[in-house]
Amino acid sequence: MKNIMVTGGAGFIGSNFIKYVLANFDYNIINFDKLTYAGNLENLSEIESDKRYRFVKGDICEKKEVEKTVEEYSIDAIVNFAAESHVDRSILGAKEFINTNVMGTHVLLEVLKEKGLEKYLQVSTDEVYGSLPEDKKEILFTEKTPITTNSPYSASKASADLLCNAFYHTFRLPILITRCSNNYGPYQFPEKLIPLMIAKALNGEKLPVYGDGKNVRDWLYVQDHCSAIIKVLQEGTHGEVYNIGGNNEWYNIDIVKLILDKLGKGEDMIQYVKDRPGHDRRYAIDSAKIMNELGWSPEYNFESGIEITVKWYIENMNWWKKVMSGEYLKYYERNYGEKVNQ
Ligand code: NAD
Ligand code: TYD
């Protein structure tokens, strides 16, 4: 395995992954990205002149574009990050989620089959397991937890996972699936909880907390997700699913208060707004399999990860101010307008 095609490499996790791999391994990386609202080549400016890196603008739904890139760069493996990734946007409209997350994955699997590539890794999510009971902290998502999807986003990701499973069983293709919990870190698009709250606080605007703020998420620093993905790509068993998580459950409201505290701002900036429809109550991952079988463990604890993250958003205001304009403002009004006015 020498030439890795990273689809969706201009997004949050994909760009962190490319930088992590180039810093620690000797692979050639071909970043294949459509550059949707979430794709930003500025995320990769530090490594754009690295000889082992190439960018190709392309859509995973377009088979010819994918085939051409696979041939031109003699691709050995695909790591698929390309997706529509935000639950709230999937509630406003599911079509692009079905297109990219399901149909796009299907195209990649067909190309994998036809070209006989060495490996394919599908970057999936713990959200395919649905929601856990809040009062039974001992229950965590394992790889055997049944798929139960509650949002159009999670349904589209689960559909892709099922296709991967089917292509593994039917055609014996070298397919791996990872399912990670919520990520945070530099370059996350400020529509997701942590960067949105940091940006709002820095802008002196209200911080919109859905419902009672008591939904629970299990947060992992993005670089730890990247190290887990490369571990699974190199050492994982084909046809297997690997959960990835930080053993780090937080109520949303406590995260928001922590961010305000770090920025020296008061809790009067919090605004409770109407809840997200179908809002999953609790996610929590059991990472025993990847830890025991592959020897992976996270390097960052939440204290260090959140410190780096808040500092990064303070020091990179231009990055997030630029992406929080234009189309973003229209999305923000559509998603929050009605919630805030309740
Ligand atoms: P993101 O929204 O920041 O980035 C997605 C990237 O995919 C963008 O660069 C975008 O331009 C690209 N893309 C979208 N449609 C495409 C298409 N049709 N063809 C080619 N490129 C396309 O997402 P992210 O947060 O970096 O998530 C990456 C992956 O990880 C997703 O598959 C997501 O489901 C999964 N995941 C995310 C999290 C999280 O907390 N963010 C947790 C677990 C799993
Ligand atoms: P998000 O970052 O969108 O990730 P996901 O829904 O995929 O877990 O949201 C994380 C949690 O934060 C989720 O419970 C919804 C909540 N949330 C808010 O309370 N307010 C917001 O403005 C956003 C974007 C999220």
Image: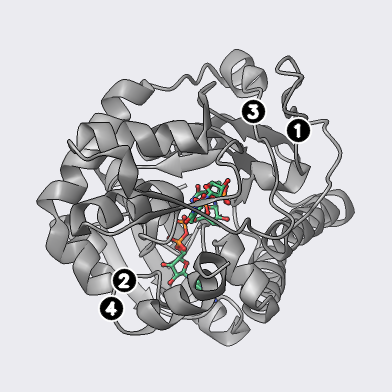
What is the x, y in percent for residue 314? 14, 48
**Tag nearer the camera, 3 or 1:** 1
Circle 4: residue type: Ser
Please tell me which of labels 4 and 2 falls first in the chain: 2
Q: Which residue is mark 4?
A: 325
Measuring 44% from the left and 50% from the top, which residue is drawn there?
193
Measuring 31% from the left and 84% from the top, which residue is drawn there?
326
Question: Disc 4, ligand 1: is the CB inside 8 Å?
Answer: no
> Spatial distance from mark 3 to mark 2, Cα to Cα?
33 Å
Please tell me which of labels 3 and 2 falls first in the chain: 2
* Front-lying residue, 1 or 290: 290
Say which element carries label 1: loop
- The mark found on residue 55 in the picture is 2
Q: Is residue 214 above or below residue 6?
A: above
| Residue 227 visible in image | no
Q: Which residue is mark 1?
A: 132
Q: Is residue 103 above or below residue 150?
A: below
